[in-house]
Image (cartoon, rainbow, N blue to C red):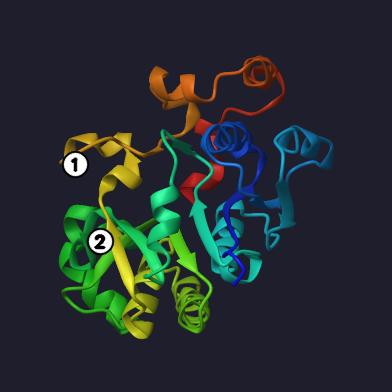
Amino acid sequence: MAAATKGFITILTGIYSFQDCIHFLAAVRKFHQEPIIILIDRIPKFLYPLLKVYKNVILKPAPPNENTVLASREAKLSLYASSEFDKTIYLDSDICLLTNLNDVFDYLDEDDFLLTEDVQPKIVKATNLLRGKQEEIISEVLPTLQSIGLPLQEDSIQYNGGFIAFRKTETTEKFFGEFRRFFEIVKNNQDKLLLKDQGAFAAAIASVKPKIKILPPNYNYLSKWQEAYKIDGEIKVLHCTYPYRPQYAKNITRSLYTRIFDRLAQVFLPNQITNPWRTK
């Protein structure tokens, strides 16, 4: 029996995340040699060779959109179709591996999905999905999501989509079909909702009920929210954009190539912290 193929996917839609993606590739290559697919949009082609410096990197077009945040959301909906592997680990491009993820690939022998919960895991408190002042809309979260057709309940969980590991099965294919359907509902209700995918993702989980394994925050540690975590053991995946990354994480990806790139980036790349699409 042939060994299961495995690999990584990330998304790069827009020049603001280019530096993050370079360091993402460096971090993965520090610990893994599996193929890395980048779903890419609105990046000048003369910059492609800077990504291909790392071996076994595959560039695929992401669904094009002037709004790079929407392009990123659409790309996430296409992860199943875009993956060439039996086992896939998707990571946001502003993630830095601090160790290998061989155990994640092993877990996929048994489970359809491996996920991490959001810092605020309860859908009923997910004010981050709705428009309006958070302190005023908390009682409206679940009724609003249900009113537009998302099959969510009081015990539904919000997952952080920066880390998604899945295997190719009929169940996961069905999940991504439902994920797309529910995200279209989110897009069609922008008067009420922000352009985020967590609600649609949770709705697809509730609808399809795949076999999932919830991993601790060690696998998707957002340093911005470090006070909200209770961490047991080593942090494996640091979710933090490069300019804010602690030095120990920057050291993971430090090389002659990244040092030269970072110097040049100050000249030819825009400041990613001021990305105007983050406010859309």
Q: Which mark is residue 154?
A: none
Q: Amino acid at mark 2?
A: Ala
- Residue name at image x 26 percent, y 38 percent: 225
Q: Position of residue 224 (x, y in %)?
A: 31, 35
- The residue nearer to you, when weighing 148 against 61, is 61
Q: Position of residue 91 (x, y in %)?
A: 49, 50
* Disc 1 from disc 2: Cα separation: 17 Å
Mark 2 Cα shell of 10 Å, populated few (<14), some (14-19), many (≥20) = many
- The residue nearer to you, when weighing 13 against 149, is 13
Instruction: Say if 154 sits above or below 82 in the image.
Output: below
Where disc 2 sits, the SS reads loop
Instruction: Say if 171 sits above or below 30 in the image.
Output: below
Q: Position of residue 10 (x, y in %)?
A: 57, 50
Whether tag 1 and tag 2 are in contact, CB under 8 A, the answer is: no
For mark 2, what is the residue? 126
Q: Which mark is residue 229?
A: 1
